Amino acid sequence: MNSTFRTGPVVLLVSLIVILTGCKKDNDQPVPTPTFGSINIQFKHVFNEIPLLLDTLAWTDDFNNSFEINEVQYFISDVRLHLKGGGTYQIATSDGIHYVDARIPESHQWLPVDQIPPATYDSVSFTFGLNAVKNQSNRFPDPPERDMFWPEILGGGYHYMKLNTKWKNDTVAELRPFMMHLGIGQIYDPDKPDSIIGYVQNYFFVKLDSSSFVMETGKLKILVLTMHLDRWFDGPPDAINLATMPQGIMQNQPLMHTVCLNGRGAFSVKIE
Amino acid sequence: MTRNTLYIILILALFSCKKSDPPAPSYQPTPYQIEIPFRFPTHLNIPDDNPMTVEGIELGRMLFYDGRISGRTDPDSMMCCATCHLQSRSFECGIDHPVYTGGHPFGVTGISTPHFMMPLINLVWTHTGYLWNGVIEEGNPDPSRRHLEDLVWMGIVAPHEMHSDTNQAKELIQRIPGYPQRFEQAFGSPVVTVKNMGKAIAQFVRTLISADSKFDQYLRGEVQLNPAELNGYILFVTEQGGDCFHCHGGEGNPLFTTNLFYNNGKDSVFTDPRDRYQVTGNPNDIGAYKAPTLRNLLFTAPYMHDGRFRTIDEVLDFYSSGLVWSPYINPLMHHISTNGNQLTPAEKADLKAFLLTLTDSTFVTNPEFGMPDLP
């Protein structure tokens, strides 16, 4: 028998195998079964339960001042999921810091890459602003976070929040600015009002107790974190009257303290 | 079927998955890496389709300074970027310009530009659009008016600038010995196109980085500010002082602009068809313009979009007691209830002393930004 016809089928078979298998990707690795869940944090802003409209004279405080809100920009950090029975899981993505700007829709959603241990969690908490360790000057070289910088002379780091408004009332017809800017506070020398003799960390801790949920393996939980803007102004505990306030508070520690107390109650969370 | 045929099939099979080799590039420009100055932003605005190269920058520098990009050779009507953008004036024309009286440029036909100039400083960090109203931005519905590159063809045809024709411009550049080779080295083709002219000039402009003022040296720990300058800086960054920093940056934003848009209380009646409102349609942007960088303020008079203030002192007086209320004023202008921040003469002097620490003399004399030998 001609050798060509003896070896031919073998060569053809080898060729066929090479053709059929040669381009196959090495994707035969078994897909690992996830052992964790994920979370997506969404940020919403309301005023008296009405979704925020920027640049619109649509809001009224407890003192019948009408006002518009022009900017809402803030940091939250150290989001913690509290385990039922003790212990916490702290979001570590982006060093645990997220910046929210009401004008930047992309910032209204945070998708941490954290792998959340499956468990029952009975509450969620976070830091409003940045704690003293994280609030380091020049950590954000690029906008928009960069533009939150808080001058070194006033304590350094970053604004926790910029909430810019313009208001009017029955006796003040022209819209007047009011800037609710929070960050590190200053203690001024009573004898020399221009001299700063100390600083106050104004960041605060918010724990939302009605936020229990069960994290299941391979599942995504959505935490909808709502800022109730009216509560920054109306409290509790203290309603502030824009008509009797200075136009800004970033060098006024007593007022920053009052606003921070209001801010502790300015959030709610819903788990979806 | 012969044995050889079968072996050929086998060889073909073995090599059937091999990717074809990429064609050898016909040109290999030298990549150019921008060095990020101390504390400057890391996110650069360099389009994917116009990477920085040594050859592109050098070509762009030539075109920036070559009046023939106007498509004309008559010295009386030649015009280029450098006709108005003078290095000695931080790439504005300056209030003392011998032709553009008071610092207001006009085109070859004598028509004045709609606005006064903005300095060409640190534009590689601009992400919010170019010009006073930011109309040259990604969101512009006209795709030919979105990038720094696009300002070149716009300048060639604008009646208040070169008032020329892009075909005429590119054909003239094409005919000049030396340019086709430089286009080939930069972009891989000796054919001159207006698009590549724009790319080259944009590359050069992106190298115009100012980061060596006295204040930069202070931030780097190389020099100390004197007491007046330090006090001026404190006024600059405090809400109860001058409160300049919310719009103009500071140690946390050494660009000395947020590159954002503000109605800063100059007027109560607004008729300019080129304010920010014309871009966004948001009434709160009526009368709003981009906050310009304060770097090299010494060289960039007159000030504001309409050049209404001739000196730094006039600007400080305006912010101290000249603010005008309107419903559109930005809330950051919180001193409006007292018509300004009410700085004392001594405070204004200190604030001015600080502002002058933003003067970067090495930038305005850097030979790498000056006029090159032209083809």
Image: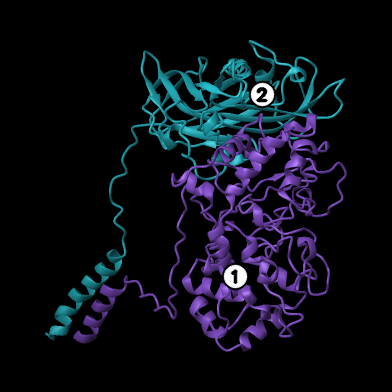
Chain colours: A cyan, B purple
Quadrant assignment, res A182 = top right
Q: Position of residue B364 (x, y in %)?
A: 58, 62
- Amino acid type of the residue tagged 1 in the rendering: Ile
A140 vs A68, left or right, is left
Q: Position of residue B127 (x, y in %)?
A: 60, 52
Q: Which residue, given by chain and number where applicable, does mark 2 sit on?
A: A229
Q: Secondary structure at mark 1?
A: helix
B109 vs A26, left or right, is right
Residue at 51% across / 48% down in the picture? Answer: B216
Query: Dot 2 falls on which chain?
Result: A
Work out which quarter of the rendered image holds the N terminus of chain B and state it.
bottom left
Query: Dot 1 falls on which chain?
Result: B
Q: Position of residue B281 (x, y in %)?
A: 78, 47
B80 vs A218, left or right, is right
Q: Residues within 10 Å of mark 2 (few under 14, many from 20)?
A: many
**Residue A152 seen in the figure:** yes
Residue at 44% across / 68% down in the picture? Answer: B31
- Between B308 and B174, which is closer to the camera in this rendering? B308
* Spatial CA span between label 2 and label 1: 47 Å
Q: Residues within 10 Å of mark 1 (few under 14, many from 20)?
A: many
Quadrant assignment, res A165 = top right
Query: Is residue B351 placed above or below A208 in the rendered structure?
Result: below
